[in-house]
Image: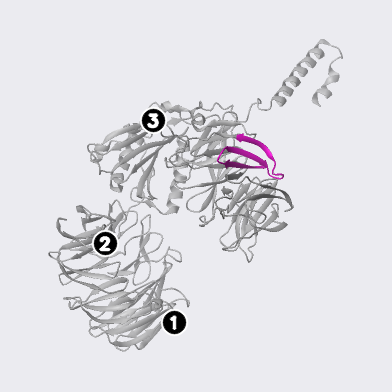
Amino acid sequence: MGMDREAPAQRAGSPARTRALRIIGAVLLLVACAVVAGDTTRPQPGPVAWRTAWSLPVGQEPPGPPEPRHAVAEGGLAVVTAQGAVDVHDARTGRRRYTIAAEAVPATAAWLAGETIVVARRAPGAAERGLAAYDLAGGRPLWRRTVTAADTPSEEDEPRHSGYMIMVTEEAVTFLDRQVAPFTITSLGLRTGEVTARTRRPPGCFSYGAAARRSVALLTECQDRIELVSLDARTLRPVWTRPLPAPAPADHPWSGVTAGGDGYLAVTVRGAQSFVAPDGRLLSGVRAALAGPPPTGLERWSRPLLVGSYPEVTGARSGALDGTRPTPMFLISLETATGRLLALPIATPAAVPRLVGATEDMAYVHDEIGAIVAYELVRGRPGGMPPARWPDACALLDVASAGLDGYLPGPARRTVAGALTPKPAGCDWIPPAGDGAAVSVTVVWMFATPGGAREVFDAFVRRVKESGRYDPVTETSHALTQSIPLPGGTVSESIVTAGPALVQLRSTSRRALRLLTPVLQRALLTRYEPATTVAEPARRAGWVFAADEPIGAVLVADGSVYAGSRAEVHALDAASGTLRWSRGMGGFVTAGPILAGGTVYAAGLPGQVRAVSAASGRTRWSREVAQVSGLAAGRGIVYAWTDDGRVIALDGAAGRTRWKAGTGDLIRSLTPHAAGELVYVAGSAGVAALDARSGIRRWRFPVDEKEGAARVTISRDTVYVALADGRIYALDRITGRLRWRFRADAPSFAGLVASGGDVYAGGGGALHKLDAATGRVKRTFEVGAAGTATTTLAVAGGVAYLTHSGVRMDAVDTATGELRWTYPLSGRPGWLADAAVPAAGTVYVQAGDGTLHAVATATGARRWILESGDAFGTAPVAAGGMVYIGSHNGNLHATR
C-alpha cells in the first residue's frame, strides 16, 4: 500500500521505476521461495533456559492404575482435587478460574485438548467410567457418556495394552472399549461424544499407546513384527506405519511410547530408545541424538518431550538414556530435523517428576512433594558454558583435608551438547577399604551466567525444604544437604553453587558429607567467587552430631549421651558432643539401646543381643536370640521379647539365659517393677505378670483385642491398664485382682499418668482426674471439642500438658481445671507428636513437621523453635540444662 501511494512521484517507464520494479520482483520471489521452502526460514531465537514461573500445590498422585489427574493446553490447566472436583486454572499465571463441582461419583482423571475438558468419574472398584466434556472457556457441559475402558487383560491370549486406557486429542476421545469386545479401540467426537470409529487390534500382540495432538500413537509388539502406527484419532485409520527392528533384550527390557504436545515421539523397544517425527520419520537413535554438535541458534526444537536426569548413555551396549544422574532435573526437547536432544535444567529436586504437558513457551511438571511447577521458556542465543571451560571434578575436592586418607580418584568424562568434556565432570572417590564410605562429585551443570546457577539453586532449596528431608546444620547461602530415600537405604547429597557452577557431592556416609561439604564449597568459592562471604543461618547454642542413619533412641546418663541408629550405637560427651565411641551392633538394630548398670544393650539382625561397656564401647558379651523386638532391664536382668510372644531373661553381667517363657500374645511392652519380683507384659490380648526369677506366670488379665492394645502404667502397688477405646482398669500389682474400672467417652491414645494419689487420663476433648484408690471421678476438665484426639499426656508441677495430633498443646491446672494456656503447634492433623517433656520451667514438645518447641510453663510463651529438617525419631530428653532429640535425617541435636 505504501508503494502505491508513492508511485505517482515517479514517471511511468522511467529507469528509476524500472529498477524499483525489478528489486520488488526479486524480493517477492525470495519471499515466495521462503514460504514454499517452509523450514528454510530463519527461526526465532532458540531455547536457552527454563525460568520458574509459579507453583501450585495439588497433592501427590494416588495409588492405583495410572490416570492423568492434571492436564494442560494453551487455554488452561485442569486439576482433579482430592474431593473429586476439577479446578481449572489459567495456564500462564496459575490463578484458578472456575471449578467443575464434585458429584456423587468423584472425578478421577481429566484431559484438556483444544477448547475442551474431558473428565472421567469412577466409583471405587467399578468397571464403568462416566465421561463428560466441558467447554474450556467457562465450564459449560457439552456431553456425557458411560464407557467401560479396559484396565487389565482378562486372558493371556487377548491383546494387551500398557499406558493410559483413555487418550484425548484435539479430534477425539479414544479408549480401549471392553464393552464391545476385549481391547476394541473406540473414538468419540471431542465436542459431541458420538462414536466416530471403532477398530480391533490384532490378537496376540502387546500395545503401548500415547495421545499426540491430533493422532494416537500405538507401539505394537507381535510375535512376528514390531511396528509403530499413527492413527487418525477421529477415524482410527492409519496415517502412517513404521516397522521397527527388534533389538536384543536389555537388562531391563522395557518398551513404551511417549508423545509430545506437538506430535514428536520417544519410542523405547526392549530397552532401545529412538525418536520419531510427527510424519513417521525416524529422526535418531539415542546415541545419535546425543552426538550432535552444540546448538547454533538456527535449529527448530520441539516442545519438551521428557523430564528427567541429564540425558546420557552408560555402557557400551546401552541403547537408552541413563537416569541415574540426580539434581537438578532437565526438560528435554528434540531438534526437529535431526533428532538431536536439548536438555535444559529446571529447579526440581531429584525425584520422580512427571511432565504434565507443554504449551508454546511453557512447561508444567508435577514433582515429588505434590505441586505442579510451571516453567517459562527463555529464548536467546545459544548459551551455557562450553565443555572446555568446565572444571575438573576431581580437583574440586581435597578429601585428605577432611581426614579421609587413602582415597583414590576415579575420573569420568561426560558428553555435554554432543562433545566430551576435556576434563572429568564426575569423580568417584574410592575408599581404601571395601567398607569405607563412597564419595562422588559431579559437575551437574555450568550455566552461562552466575545468575542462572543461583536461580536454579535457590528454587531447588525452596523445593527441598518443602519436602522436609534436608539438613539445616550444613545449610549456607551456597550449599544445602538433603537425604534421598532409596530402596537399598538412604543416600545423602549436598548441592553447592558458586559463580556459574552447580555441583553435587554425594556419599553413603552423612558424617563424610558433613566434613566434605565445606571443603567443596571453599574450592568453588576460591575459583569463582573469591571475595564472597558465606552466609549461614543463625544456629542455636549446643551441638549436633551426624550419624549415617536415622536416630531412633536417645539415653542420657552420667555425663554421656547414647544414641542408637539403625545399625550402630554412639556415645558422646553430653556437654560438648565429642564422640567417645561408636559400635556396630552386628546388623539392623531391632530393639534398644537401653542402659543399665554401666552397660548398653541392643538387639540386631540376624538375631543377636549384644552388651557393650558404656564407658568404652567394648563388647562384654553377645547372645543369639532370634526375632527380638524389644528389650527392658531391671535388677541385673535383661528381658528380651520376640515377635512370636516369647520372653527371654538374660543375666545382665554374663549374658547367660536365666529362663524363657511363652505368652501366646503379640507383646507390645514389658515393664519390670522397681521391687524386682514381677515383670508385667502387655499385649494385644491383655496383661500378664511373670515371676522375675523363674518366668512363671503369676496372673493374667485378658482384654478383647477389639478394645485396642493395652498400655501399662505401674505405681507402687497398682497396675493401670489403658486401652485405646477409652477403658481404664486398675489391678492389684501382686494378685491381678480388679480394683476398679473407668471408661472415657472417647478413644484415648495417650495412656494415663499416675501422680500424687491421682490418675489422669485424656480422652476426646476432656481430661479426667480420677482417685487412684477408688477410680472415682474427682474432676473432668474440658480441653477441646468433643471427638478431638488427645495423643500425649504429661503431668508435672500441678499442670497437665496434653497434645492433640501435633496441632496444639493445652496446659490445664490439675487443681482447678482452669485452662492456663494453649500453644499452637506447627504440625498438621494426623501427625502425632511425642509426649510433652516438662523440665525446669520449660516444656519441650515436638510437632510432626520436624520442629521442636520450647514453651514457658508459666505463660505458654514460646522460648525458641528448633528446625531439624526432617521428622523426629525420638522424644526429647531433658537433662543437665540441655535437651537432646534425634531426627530421621541422622542428626542428634543438643541445645538449651
Horizontal side of 720 relative to 256 (left or right) equals: left
Residue identified by numbered label 1: 745
Q: Residue 58 sits in which quadrant?
A: bottom right
Estimate the spatial distance between the alpha carbons at disc 2 and disc 3, rounded to whole Å: 45 Å
> Where the C terminus falls, by quadrant?
bottom left
Q: Is residue 53 above or below residue 805?
A: above
Amino acid at dot 2: Val
Q: Earlier in the sequence, mark 1 or mark 2?
A: 2
Q: Earlier in the sequence, mark 2 or mark 3?
A: 3
- Look at discs 2 and 3 and give the one toward the viewer: 3
Q: How far across and down, in percent of the image, does residue 90 sit? A: 63, 50
Q: Earlier in the sequence, mark 1 or mark 3?
A: 3
Q: Residue at left 35%, top 60%?
A: 872
Residue identified by numbered label 3: 413
Q: Residue 667 sits in which quadrant?
A: bottom left
Residue identified by numbered label 2: 554
Tag 1 and tag 2, C-beta contact below 8 Å? no
Label 1 crowd bin: few (<14), some (14–19), many (20+), radius 10 Å: some
Q: How far across and down, in percent of the image, does residue 372 sit? A: 54, 50
